[in-house]
Image: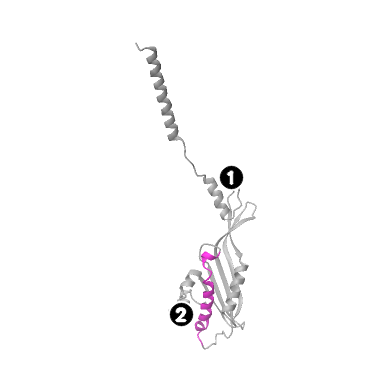
Amino acid sequence: MMSRKARIILFSGILLIAVIAAVIVSAVLSPGPVERYDDIASSTAVLVATPVTSDSAEYTPCGWQWATQPNPNLSAEIQQRLADRLSGVQISEARAESYGENCLNADGSVRYFAAMQTDFRIIIRVEGLSAATSEPVQEILRPLADDVLAVLADYPPDDTPGPQPGMISLEFSAAAQESPSYRIWTRTDMAMQARNPQLSTSEFFNALGGLH
């Protein structure tokens, strides 16, 4: 028979082993620091100027709608730079505007605007431009187009609203109403690639999608 003292020592040893095992299991199963993804989502919304609360459960999805927003400051800057570069040439219009989507609330009000790209519209009045000119139209318009693209080259997607290349609408209108007008419609990245002095005049306009 085991003595009473031996039984007490054995029981104490078993109890100590059980306590140590419980501590080890608790340490293994206890979670470490966990990153709160709801906090990350909330901070991301702030970066794109979305007025949401920190509780993601209260956020309501957008109803998206295509939209444009004028950029009057950028338009005025480009207008002035074109006027300085094209001295003596009438700049009828120089407009920059952002194209993207409006985030709409359930009542149809605009929560915020998400810009995708910045588009440019330039209209130049060209004296002496007519169908009866003896000089090929492309030869008359290339120097003007070169100057316009040189100015717009300073406004790449990284420096204007929206992450992707926008569109350039460049129109040459004659002073006389009965005379024809010519237009270039191309993406900004394609326009910048066409700024190659090694290209002939016809190759230059072909790279821009043609003169219409």
Residue appearing at x 42%, y 28% in the figure:
20
Per the model, the C-alpha gap separating discs 1 and 2 is 59 Å
Furthest-front residue in this view? 5
Furthest-top residue in this view? 1
- Give the number of marks: 2
- Tell me if residue 10 comes above or below residue 126 in the rendering: above
Callout 2: SS: helix
Mark 1 residue type: Asp
Residue appearing at x 56%, y 50% in the figure:
43
Residue 68 in magenta stretch: no
Residue 131 position within the rendered picture, expressed as x and y whole percent measured from the top left: 55, 85
Nearer to me, 19 or 166? 19
For disc 1, the neighbor class at 10 Å (few under 14, some 14 to 19, many from 20) is few
For disc 2, the neighbor class at 10 Å (few under 14, some 14 to 19, many from 20) is some
- Tell me if residue 170 comes above or below residue 108 in the rendering: below
Residue 145 in magenta stretch: yes
- Tell me if residue 14 comes above or below residue 106 in the rendering: above
Furthest-bottom residue in this view? 134
Segment colored magenta = 135-160
Mark 2 residue type: Ser
Label 1–label 2 contact, CB within 8 A: no
Earlier-in-chain disc, 1 versus 2: 1
Residue appearing at x 61%, y 56% in the figure:
112
Nearer to me, 209 or 81? 81
Q: Name the residue carrying label 2.
A: 202
Residue 73 position within the rendered picture, expressed as x and y whole percent measured from the top left: 62, 68
Q: Is residue 157 left or right of residue 79?
A: left
Q: Name the residue carrying label 1.
A: 55
